[in-house]
Image (tube, rainbow, N blue to C red):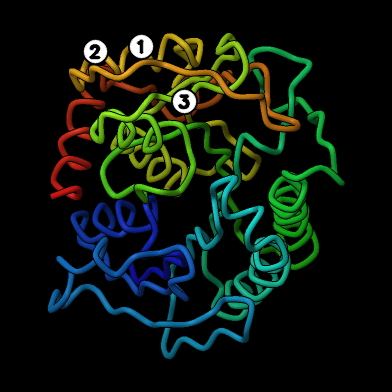
Amino acid sequence: MRILVTGAAGFLGSHLSDRLIAEGHEVIGMDNLITGDVRNIAHLAGNRRFKFIHHDVTEYIFIDGSLDGILHFASPASPIDYLQIPIQTLKVGALGTHKALGLAKAKKSRFLLASTSEVYGDPTVHPQPETYWGNVNPVGPRGCYDEAKRFAEAMTIAYRNFHGVDTRIVRIFNTYGPRMRPNDGRIVPSLINQAIRQEPLTVFGDGQQTRSFCYVSDLIEGIYRLFLSDIPDPVNIGNPHEMSVMEFAETIHELTGAVSTIIHKPLPVDDPKQRRPDITVAKTRLGWEPKVPLREGLDSTIAYFRERAR
């Protein structure tokens, strides 16, 4: 297939491009590099199955020739980004998704939207199934990202129902692995880099809030299966193994051999108290569930950040 990946220079977009190329597909990668990094796709330079286009997807997207699929991964994805570029975050979720769906309609190509567990907000249902509508504060500091993704889902469903576009929606839960930005503010790179620099490891609140961490190769496998499936409705892809943020920080502390302490800072506004996916749909309809143990995934991620720090 000939496939467009928006956000191709990002953490997930670059791994997804690798997987598609490995499966024999031709990939057109698109990114405006606001949060993406060309180093993530530098190894694809000269690959005859990969072409990169520097472009902002909130503007008209032109692709010459046919397209079999569009995987829309363009979006800032960390709390630091929401605070620094909230309008761009809203625009890529709204205008960018509209432009990408318009291209899918014109090319008669399958469209997969990268949505997020953030559509559930600070959930009152636990674990979170796809049928849960969420508990989101639209005017809080996370609202620009949460509502951008919720709008993107609504737009995707509208194009499916009104224009007959063949659509898929993946709701991505906490994912980690090589190629994350060291300073993007999310828990995995933040704690690992603090540990590597022998700085105090920062835990917000009392650390009893929970998260579930999925290694990137597992996530990409689930997304690829969803793309090839016939499931038009949202599907959770993530690791259902839940642990407290404090437990996670202690694991990072142990694996890195850090000698620094763990300190606590005030909990950010609207920070979710619990986050764990119900992956029943993915297990029963895609035959997917995560395989990589946390410590194994963290070892490779720590090695990546150690190399970046040199």
Q: Position of residue 104 (x, y in %)?
A: 58, 72
The quadrant the N terminus occupies is: bottom left
In the rendered image, residue 3, in percent from the top left (x then y), is placed at 39, 68
Image-quadrant location for residue 79 = top right
* The label number, if any, that marks residue 254 in the structure image: 2
Marks 3 and 1, how far apart at CA: 11 Å
Quadrant housing residue 299: top left
Pick whichever, 214 or 154, lies toward us: 214
Which labelled disc corresponds to residue 202? Answer: 3
SS type, badge 3: strand
Q: Amino acid at mark 2?
A: Glu
Which callout, 3 or 1, points to the residue nearer the camera?
A: 3
Q: Is residue 290 above or below residue 87?
A: above
Asked if the residue at tag 2 contacts the one at tag 1, i.e. Cβ–Cβ closer than 8 Å, the answer is yes
In the image, what residue occupies the spot 48% across and 20% down? 212
Q: Element at badge 2?
A: helix
Amino acid type at image mark 1? Glu
* Residue at image point 22% right, 61% down: 21
Query: In the figure, residue 224 lies in which quadrant?
Result: top left
Which residue is labeled 1 in the image? 250
> Looking at the picture, does residue 308 appear above or below residue 211?
below
The percent position of residue 73, horizontal first and vertical second, equals 50, 58
Please give the name of the residue rendered at 39% of the width and 17% of the height, measured from the top-left corner: 249
Q: Residues within 10 Å of mark 3 (few under 14, many from 20)?
A: some
Specify the amino acid type for callout 3: Thr
Q: Residue at x 80, y 30 (%)?
A: 133
Pointer 1 local density, CA inside 10 Å: few below 14, some 14–19, many at least 20: some
